[in-house]
Image (tube, grey):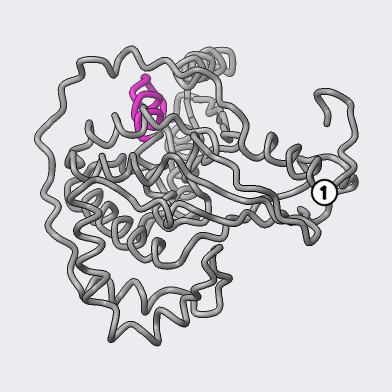
Amino acid sequence: DPATKQQAITSSEKAELLRKTFFPVPPDTDIEDIENANYPAPTAMPPITTREIEEAIEEAAPLKAPGPDGITNKALQIASPWIKHHLTKIFNQSLTLGYYPEHFRQSTTVVLRKPGKDNYTVPKAYRPIALLNTTGKIMEAVIAKRLSYLAETHNLLPDTHMGGRKLRSTEHALHLIIDKIYDAWNTGSGKVASLLLLDVSGAFDNISHARLLHNLRKRKIDERTVKWIGSFLRPRFTTLSIDGFTSEPYKLETGEPQGSNLSPILYLFYNADLIEKCGELDDTATTGFIDDVAILTWADSTKETCKKLQEALHIAE
C-alpha cells in the first residue's frame, strides 16, 4: 500500500487494497449551484418497445463473459423469442417506478495486469474489468441508445464533444484541433497557438452522482429517466476476483460501471458543462473525447496564451 507502506500478503488483503485503489472515496463536490435549480421542459421518453429489446439482444457480443448470475448473451439470444415480451414489461415497469433492480446492479470485478508495467507489486499496475449481469445490460443498452438519440436530435450536448457518439471519432477531434491551429496561424498577424490537454484520472469511478443527475435535468432528460438513472448508479455491489480468489461483495456508492453501455453517454452529459464553459473564453476552442479534454487558445504571444490557459484550468478545477 503506497499510503501506509504495508504489504498485502493474503488474497483478502490484496482484494481490500485493490478495492481502495479502484473505488476510492471521492472528494467532496461543490453542488451549491444545484440547490433550487430551475430546469427546462424535458424531452419525451415513450415506453420501451419489444423491437428495441430485440435489437439490443441481437447486438450483444455472444461470447462476452457473463456477470455473477452466469447468464450469457448467447443464452439471451437463443431465448429471445420467448423472453422478449416479458422483458418489455419488466423494463417498462422498472422505468415507470424509477427503480433499477438490485440484481442488475451486481457485478464481478476481474483484476488484470496492465501490459508493459515494470512493477506489478503496486495497485496502479492493475486494471479492473467489471462483468455485469447481461439481462440488466440489455436495458442499459436500450436507455443508452435513447439518450444518444435525444442528444443528437435535440442538440443536448456540445458539438465539439466527441467519443461515444455516432460520426464523432478521435479523427474528428484531431481535425477540429488542427483546423483551429491552422486558422490561427493563417491570420497573417503572427498568432501563437497553445494547447492544454486534460485527462481525468479514474473518470468513471469518481463522478458525482448529484452533479450528473442535475446535468441530465438541465439538459432536458425527463424526471422518470433521471430517477431511474439514479437507481442504476447506486448502490452497486461487486466482488473482486484476483488469482482465483473472490472477495465478499463490496457496496459501491460512487462512480459508474465501466462495463456498461450506458456509462459513456452519461459521462458526456456529466462533463458537457466543462466543454462549454472553457469554450466561452475569447479566442479559445475546447474539444472533448469522453473524459479527455483539449483546450486550444491563440493570441499574439505565448505569454498571453498561457495566461488564457491558466484561466481555463481554473474553470476546469
Does 229 sit left or right of 49 as displayed?
right
Residue 275 magenta-highlighted: yes
Does 20 sit left or right of 275 as displayed?
right
Residue 40 lies, in percent from the top left, at: 12, 31
Name the residue located 90 percent from the left edge and 47 percent from the top edge. Answer: 118
Q: Quadrant of the N terminus?
A: top right
Name the residue located 44 percent from the left edge and 29 percent from the top edge. Answer: 208
The rendered magenta stretch, by its main secondary structure, is classed as helix
Does 106 sit left or right of 233 as displayed?
right
Rendered image quadrant of residue 123 = top right
User: What amino acid does circle 1 point to?
Assistant: Ser
Residue 224 lies, in percent from the top left, at: 19, 43
Answer above or below: position of 34 versus 103: above
Residue 211 lies, in percent from the top left, at: 36, 27
* Structural crowding at the residue carrying mark 1, measured as other residues with C-alpha within 10 Å and reported as few (<14), some (14–19) or many (≥20): some
* Number of callouts: 1
Answer above or below: position of 301 versus 14: above
Range of magenta residues? 272-284
Rendered image quadrant of residue 149 = bottom left
Rendered image quadrant of residue 103 = bottom left
Badge 1 element: helix
Residue 232 lies, in percent from the top left, at: 37, 46
Name the residue located 24 percent from the left edge and 73 percent from the top edge. Answer: 86
Which residue lies under the disc numbered 1?
A: 11
Residue 254 magenta-highlighted: no
Does 234 sit left or right of 68 as displayed?
left
- Front in this rendered view, residue 254 or 101: 101
Q: Is residue 300 visible?
A: no
